[in-house]
Amino acid sequence: MPTFKPKLLAAAALTVLPLIAPPAALRAAPPPATPQAAEIPRDDIVVDDRTETTIKGALKWLASKQQPNGSWNTGRGNDHPVAMTGYVLMAFMAGGQLPGEGEFGKNVTRGMNYLLSCVRPDGYITNGGESNMYNHGIASIALAELYGQTRDPKLKQKLDLAIKLIVNCQNQQGGWRYRPAIVDGDISVTVLQLVAARAALNSGIEVPQQTIDRGVAFVKSCYDARSGGFVYQPHGNPPGFARTAAAIYSLQVCGRYDEPSVETGRDYLLKRQLNPSGEWFTYGNFYAAPAMYMIGGETWREWYGRLKKTLLEDAGGKLRQDAASGMTYWEPLDGQGVGPVYATAVYTTILAMPYHYIPLYQR
C-alpha cells in the first residue's frame, strides 16, 4: 500500500457499506440480493512499484497545478474549474488523500473549499462563468465522497443544497440535461446526477427514494437490446463505448449489480478494442474502470491489466515523467482538447483503484 495514505482511510478496505451508514429510512433500496450478488469475486490486484511511483508523481504534478484560489483548470486557460477540481479531488481520494490527511491533505482542503465557495444559495455549483449540470454533477460526487469520509458540518450544508438542486431538476422520465432546469435528458448528464445522489445518500444526506428509482429507470430506458450497449437518449442514437460504460457504472453504484444489462454492457465493452487514440477513451474509462472494478474477478483483472499497459507502456510521448522533480503527467491519449490536468486526474484515479480508497465503488 502507498506510504502516503492517511490514517483515516485504514478502514477503506473492501466493504459492502459506506464508512458511515445512513439511517435505514434514507438508504436506497436495491433489489433483493441474489446468490450471485453475494459472491463478490476476490480482488487480488496489487499495485506494483512502478505504478505506485507513477501515482505519486502524478499527484505531485497535480498539486503543482493548483491555482491560488484552490481550483484546478484544464491547463489550457482558466476554464471548467468546477469540473476539473472535482476530477482532481477524486484522484487525490483514490490515492488516499483527505482534507488535512496525507502528503497532499492541504491541497485537498483548498480544493474542497473552492468547490464549497462555488455553491450558490439555490445549490447550483458554478464559478459564475461557463457552467452546466455536468460540472455540477462531478463536483457533487467529489463533495459527497469527502463528506462521507470526514463528516465536516460545513460540507453537509452545501452538499445538501447541491443535492436538492439535482432532485428538483429531474424530469418526469428520470433524466437530467445540461441546464439546471426540468427539460429533456441524456445519459451523460443523467449518470453524474444519479451517482451524485447515491453518493450523498450513502454519506447520510436525505435523498428521496423516487429520485434514485426514476434515475435508474431513465438509464435502463437507454438500453439497446440488439447490441447490449446503451444509447445517448431513449430510442435514438447508436450505442457507444462511453455511453455503455457510464450506464453500467451508474447501475452498479445504485446497487443494481445483477441487472442483465450490466452483464451485456460488460460484454459490449470487452468486445471493443481498447483504442487509446479513439474518441472518448479518457472520458469513457472514467466510467468503464470503476464499472469493471465493481464487477470484479477476471473481468476487472483483464481490464485493469489492459489499461495499465496502455497508460504506462503504450502511451508514447504522452506520458511525461521528470526524474529530477519526481513528477508525472499525461497528455490525453485520445487527443481530446480538455488537456493534461483532466487526463492525469482520470488516469491516476484508474491506476489507484486497487487501493480501494473510494467508498462509492465498494460493493
Image (cartoon, helix red, strand yellow):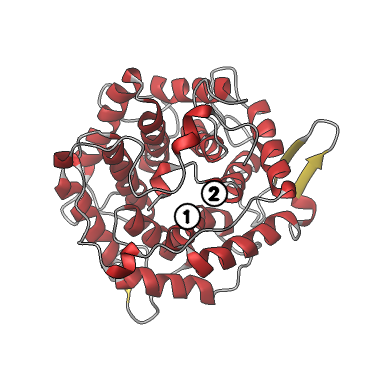
User: CA–CA distance between discs 2 and 1?
Assistant: 8 Å
Does 311 sit above or below residue 274? above
Q: Position of residue 107 (x, y in %)?
A: 57, 23
In this figure, which residue is indicated by the disc labeled 1? 290
Farthest residue toward the bottom? 226
Q: Position of residue 20 (x, y in %)?
A: 31, 35
Which is nearer the eye, 266 or 246? 266
In the image, which disc is placed on residue 164? none
The residue depicted at 55 percent of the width and 50 percent of the height is 354
Q: Callout 1: few (<14), some (14-19), or many (20+) C-alpha neighbours within 10 Å?
A: many
Look at label 2 and name its amino acid.
Answer: Met
The residue depicted at 70 percent of the width and 46 percent of the height is 330
Q: Are marks 2 and 1 in contact (CB under 8 Å)?
A: yes
In this figure, which residue is indicated by the disc labeled 2? 353
Mark sitting earlier along the chain (2/1): 1
> Quick one: quadrant of the N terminus?
top right
Look at label 1 and name its amino acid.
Answer: Pro
Which is nearer the eye, 261 or 241? 261
Which is nearer the eye, 176 or 61? 61
Position of 339 compared to 189: left or right? right
Answer with the quarter of the image where residue 360 lies. top left
The residue depicted at 22 percent of the width and 50 percent of the height is 212
Front position among marks 2 and 1: 2
Q: Callout 2: few (<14), some (14-19), or many (20+) C-alpha neighbours within 10 Å?
A: many
Farthest residue toward the right? 324
